[in-house]
Amino acid sequence: MGEFCMPSLGADMDEGTLIEWFVAPGDLVRRGDIVAVVDTEKSDIEVEVFEDGTVTELLVDVGATVPVGTPLARIEATPRSRVTPSPAPAAPAAPAASGPPRGVPTTSRTAGRVLSPLVRHLAEDLRVDASDLRGSGPGGVVTRRDVERAARASQGAPAPRRPPAGAGTRLRASPYARRLAGERGVDLHGVVGSGPGGAVLATDVPIAAPPDRAGSRTVDRDGDVRGAIARSMARSKREIPHYYLQTTIDLGPALDWLRRRNEDRPVTERVLPAVLLLKATAVAAAEHPALNGRWEDGHRPASNVHLGVAIALRGGGIVAPGIADADRLPLDELMAALRDLSARARAGRLRQGEWTGPTITVTNLGDLGVDAVWGVINPPQLAMVGFGAVRDAVLAVDGLPAVRPAVITSLAADHRTSDGMQGAAFLGRIARLLGSPESLDPPTPDHHDDGAIP
């Protein structure tokens, strides 16, 4: 019997608040399944499990704030070879007046077929009407495979009309949007969502004064984010002996190559120049373990490059979630991953591995017109790479002066694991990769694992 505990979702996180369960006792879970949402100072994080098994007990109520490491649920481990859909539980008698057991969400039932919360949320995310499905599980239970099969079959079909509020459907909204709505006294049933399937995102919630209640306290999420950043950066400058390097990189070959690559593609399938910078950084980091990894009771080099990307939040503040195995992703996949990560970060729907997994981080302030950025390392990482604006500069090309598009690239690194020579070699490798951009887009490799950030 294993315990699923409140994870540490940041270097300075001491506690978290459980704000949603996606599972109930008896549900089968697989490694990587999202089972809960935890509130931190910076964002609401989707928390996943890292073993196959069956949920036997939920130990913490929704809304409870508990220290990191507190057991949230018990999971009976199941060997991978035995992972099959769970049999349908028997229909219970009429509920007692006392309601469901402590911390247990109510299980949905559709046309007599039992759906676990995990399957129900999957159906909602994929915009599948589970009431029309014929379950393939024992007793007609609708399983994950049934939902995924229905989603594939409906691709290309017109999207179902969104039913009016109050028609018996579950309101789709991010946890952060629900929090903001509660603070501002906004009824989400009257808000038109801009997210997938009409989901209400935090940016959709109108600004309104919360109701005037005696003794009430409005939670300042922006203040929480800024406070968390302040503590993390203060720790970084206090504990990490930074050193800094800078170089100017000629982007002419990279931008010319990218322009030719994008010219016959629709706008939605084009790769942005920023993705070339991310890919070059990730590939270089894979070759320089002194800059890629963590400092946790000593140097712990990483075997993979999980590239953190600094993303500005609309309400203020910055988060830096990670893209797993960024050095191995083809450019198209890296572009798609960046779009998805940015959208979910701003909607407050990051996942646990994206939050805790990065091994090196990139910050790019070029879009804001900044010529150069000097980063502060995000502990316990070992380095941060900064890119400024792409500007025309006079550079020496074949011994002659030429006007070329160029970017100032900086490195902030931990002197405990690397020195100036290693840092210079790292920046030089980024420059050479961008000088031969075709090397950044090889054929799709065979991934050795499921790509999840550990």
Image (tube, rainbow, N blue to C red):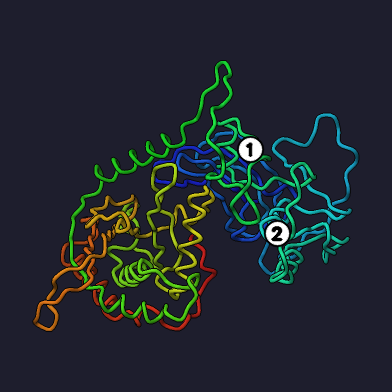
Q: Nearest to the eye among marks 1 and 2: give it.
A: 2
Badge 1: residue crowd in 10 Å (few <14, some 14–19, many ≥20): many
According to the picture, the residue beneath numbered tag 2 turns out to be 127
Q: Which of 123 and 46 is in front in this view?
A: 123
Badge 2: residue crowd in 10 Å (few <14, some 14–19, many ≥20): some
Please identify the residue farthest to the top as the structure is shown. 214
* Residue drawn at point x = 55 percent, y = 17 percent: 215
- Please identify the quarter of the rendering in which residue 300 is found: bottom left
Residue 446, position as x, y percentages in the image: 50, 80
- Please identify the quarter of the rendering in which residue 400 is found: bottom left
Q: Which is nearer the N-term, disc 1 or disc 2?
A: 1
Q: Which of 369 and 85 is in front in this view?
A: 369
Q: Nearer the viewer, residue 121 or 357?
A: 121
* Residue drawn at point x = 24 percent, y = 57 percent: 413
- Please identify the quarter of the rendering in which residue 277 is found: bottom left
Q: Which mark is residue 230?
A: none
User: Does 391 sit left or right of 39 as displayed?
Assistant: left
Residue 316, position as x, y percentages in the image: 40, 42
Q: Residue 60 carries which label?
A: 1
CA distance for labels 1 and 2 = 30 Å
Please identify the residue farthest to the right as the structure is shown. 93
Q: Which of 222 and 329 is in front in this view?
A: 222
Q: Tag 2: residue type? A: Arg
Q: Tag 1: residue type? A: Val
Describe the element under mark 1 as helix, strand or loop: loop
Residue 271, position as x, y percentages in the image: 42, 72
User: Does 207 sit left or right of 146 as displayed?
Assistant: left
User: Does 274 sit left or right of 158 as displayed?
Assistant: left
Describe the element under mark 2 as helix, strand or loop: loop
* Residue drawn at point x = 79 percent, y = 58 percent: 130
Quick check: 341 above or below 189? below
